[in-house]
Image (cartoon, helix red, strand yellow):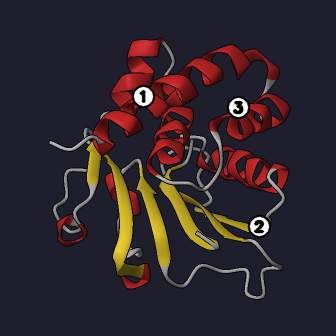
Amino acid sequence: MDSYEIRLCGTGGQGLILAGRILADAVVREGRWVAQSQAFEPLSRGGVSQADLVISSSMVDFPLVSDLDFLLVLDELAVAGTHELLTPASSILLDSERVATDALDACRPIRLPLVETARTLGNLRAANMVALGALVALTDVCQRDSLEAAMLRVSPKGFQQINQRAIEVGCGLGAESKQPA
């Protein structure tokens, strides 16, 4: 695609602002333009948190999302406020454990065990990287190697190994969900 509008949302502490920064860095590495914004409630953990990205092959002329191409939701609390940004063509990735609502079912969301997968890897804080891996496998927003390079550059040093494994596993989850049933 020539352009993408993406929202990564969940609650504070899930690392979605960091995930947005990493995805933005990966896209820039591939020579595209990106405007990244973020919003979060003034709670350190538990309040709604989101990172929005507008990605284009040319200069971004409006930096805020208006028609989402891709929505990632890691927590039920973050579903509110997204409906008006969705179109019939929007792709939605939901955590199968933490997002039980059927409010987005009209858009045929993909439900994957993102948080549970991070738990099995030994670190719940890696759910954001599992989700980014799945996003990359489900879209052509960037190449996996660009995402991994950006993660290594932006991610805190103590989390690089688990984050790299989480991206790998997330890519596998996303690729499996693309397979015809």
User: Residue at position x 57%, y 40% from top?
Assistant: 13
User: Considering only vertical position in the picture, is 134 above or below 108?
Assistant: above
Left or right: 21 in relation to 179: right
User: Residue at position x 81%, y 37% from top?
Assistant: 154
**Mark 1 vs 2, N-terminal side:** 2
Amino acid beneath label 3: Glu
Residue 40 horizontal/vertical position (percent): 61, 61
Q: Are marks 3 and 2 in contact (CB under 8 Å)?
A: no
- Distance between the Cα atoms at labels 3 and 2? 18 Å
* SS at badge 2: strand
User: Residue at position x 41%, y 61% from top?
Assistant: 78
Alpha-carbon neighbours of circle 2 within 10 Å: few (<14), some, or many (≥20)?
A: many
- Distance between the Cα atoms at labels 1 and 3? 14 Å
Task: Say which of 1 and 120 sits in front.
Answer: 1
Task: Say which of 11 and 85 sits in front.
Answer: 85
Amino acid beneath label 1: Gly
Q: Which residue is mark 3?
A: 148
Amino acid beneath label 2: Val
Task: Look at the image and tell me whether residue 46 can be seen.
Answer: yes
Residue 29 horizontal/vertical position (percent): 83, 49
* Residue 172: image tag: 1
Q: Which residue is mark 2?
A: 34
**Mark 3 vs 2, N-terminal side:** 2
Counting the numbered discs, the total is 3
* SS at badge 3: helix
Left or right: 177 in relation to 158: left
User: Considering only vertical position in the picture, is 175 above or below 74?
Assistant: above
